[in-house]
């Protein structure tokens, strides 16, 4: 019996290891076997039966324990495979949404070179983050936050030459430590060429970035900001349609920067002052924040907006 068990368990371990899945494997069954071996070993020791049978018990127990580690490893592989499958399904849904939607909006805001600004020691957690490009890096978010009574901290975390493919790593290293409660994502200008070659990869990278943000804070407010398109470029137009479809699929906000061109700073200040005086504690909506930030950019950075960098 011991010899048969001794040979069967290693074969079972090898089979489970090669299968790379925990499906069909029962962890309670394995634990029950381990309990049985421990009970047998304990009985031998109590009765003073120190012989070769006890040694084989220990050997079999070690092999069965190995099965537990293989099970844990296979469960991790199953989870990884499931996440990958979910991303593909969601990307396919976005592609279908883009194909059905008539593209009607022309975007006139610009995105240029990106600049990296490392986090400062004084920066607080639970803030709103602007993750943008060359146009965005010069937006004085702190000044605007004060002028328009933002009831939260906001930091400008733009990054030089950031591509969408690298955005998730950048978020994890630079922004995630701040545990943001809100984030405005304004990237994609460096992905135009790659989008032409593979729009599915563009969608996958955006989905991965949003997933990482939600893993950092599942309650994080997220707004995706469209790309500037003053020249009515067809590729940029299609990219904006993808970004909008992603926002709808992931149930996050989509900011149309055409609204920012009509920004009235005095009226906005009056509204903010009224809300503040009324004692309203609700955090300012991200779409309002986007209108204020890029409304300022339209009024103060026309040379950048009208001459966007579309190098991919």
Image (spheres, rainbow, N blue to C red):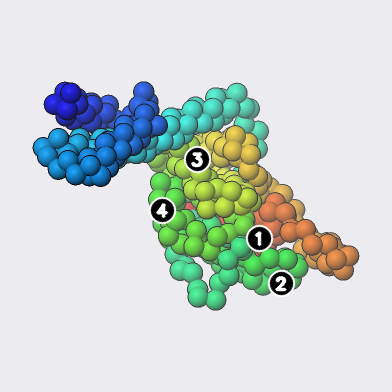
Taking the spot 30% from the left edge, 38% from the top edge, the residue there is 39
Mark 4 or mark 1: name the one nearer the start of the chain. Answer: 4
Question: Which residue in the protein does label 1 denote?
Answer: 293
Secondary-structure class at tag 2: helix
Say which of marks 4 and 1 sits in front. Answer: 4
Question: Which residue in the protein does label 2 denote?
Answer: 146
Considering every residue shown, the one lying at the far front of the view is: 47
Label 2 crowd bin: few (<14), some (14–19), many (20+), radius 10 Å: few
* Disc 3 to disc 1, C-alpha distance: 25 Å
Question: Which residue in the protein does label 3 denote?
Answer: 207
* Disc 3 to disc 2, C-alpha distance: 33 Å
Toward the viewer: 14 or 195?
Answer: 14
Taking the spot 52% from the left edge, 38% from the top edge, the residue there is 239
Tell me, for residue 169, which label it has, or none.
Answer: 4
User: Residue 272 occupies which quadrant of the picture?
Assistant: bottom right
Secondary-structure class at tag 4: helix
Toward the viewer: 308 or 123?
Answer: 123
Toward the viewer: 182 or 241?
Answer: 182
The reply to whether dot 2 and dot 1 touch (C-beta < 8 Å) is no
* Disc 2 to disc 1, C-alpha distance: 12 Å
């Amino acid at each position: 019996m011991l010899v048969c068990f001794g040979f069967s368990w290693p074969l079972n371990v090898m089979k489970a290891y090669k299968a790379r899945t925990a499906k069909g494997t029962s962890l309670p069954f394995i634990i029950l076997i381990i309990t049985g071996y421990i009970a047998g070993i304990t009985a031998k020791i109590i009765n003073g039966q120190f012989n070769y049978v006890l040694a084989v018990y220990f050997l079999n127990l070690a092999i069965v324990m190995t099965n537990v580690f293989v099970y844990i490893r296979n469960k991790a592989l199953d989870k990884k495979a499931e996440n990958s499958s979910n991303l593909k399904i969601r990307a396919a849904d976005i592609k279908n949404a883009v194909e059905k939607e008539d593209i009607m909006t022309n975007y006139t805001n610009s995105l240029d070179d990106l600049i990296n600004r490392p986090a400062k020691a004084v920066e607080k957690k639970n803030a709103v983050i602007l993750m943008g490009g060359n146009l965005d890096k010069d937006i004085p978010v702190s000044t605007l936050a004060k002028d328009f009574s933002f009831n939260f901290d906001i930091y400008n975390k733009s990054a030089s030459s950031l591509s969408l493919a690298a955005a998730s790593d950048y978020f994890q290293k630079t922004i995630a430590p701040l545990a943001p409660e809100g984030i405005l994502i304004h990237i994609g200008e460096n992905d135009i060429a790659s989008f032409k070659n593979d729009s599915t990869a563009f969608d996958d990278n955006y989905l991965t970035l949003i997933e990482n943000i939600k893993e950092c804070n599942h309650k994080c407010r997220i707004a995706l900001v469209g790309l500037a398109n003053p020249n009515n470029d067809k590729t940029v137009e299609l990219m904006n349609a993808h970004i909008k479809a992603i926002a709808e699929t992931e149930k996050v906000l989509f900011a149309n920067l055409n609204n920012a061109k009509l920004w009235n700073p005095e009226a906005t200040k009056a509204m903010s002052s009224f809300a503040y005086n009324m004692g309203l504690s609700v955090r300012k909506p991200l779409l309002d924040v986007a209108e204020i930030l890029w409304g300022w950019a339209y009024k103060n950075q026309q040379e950048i907006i009208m001459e966007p960098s579309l190098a991919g």
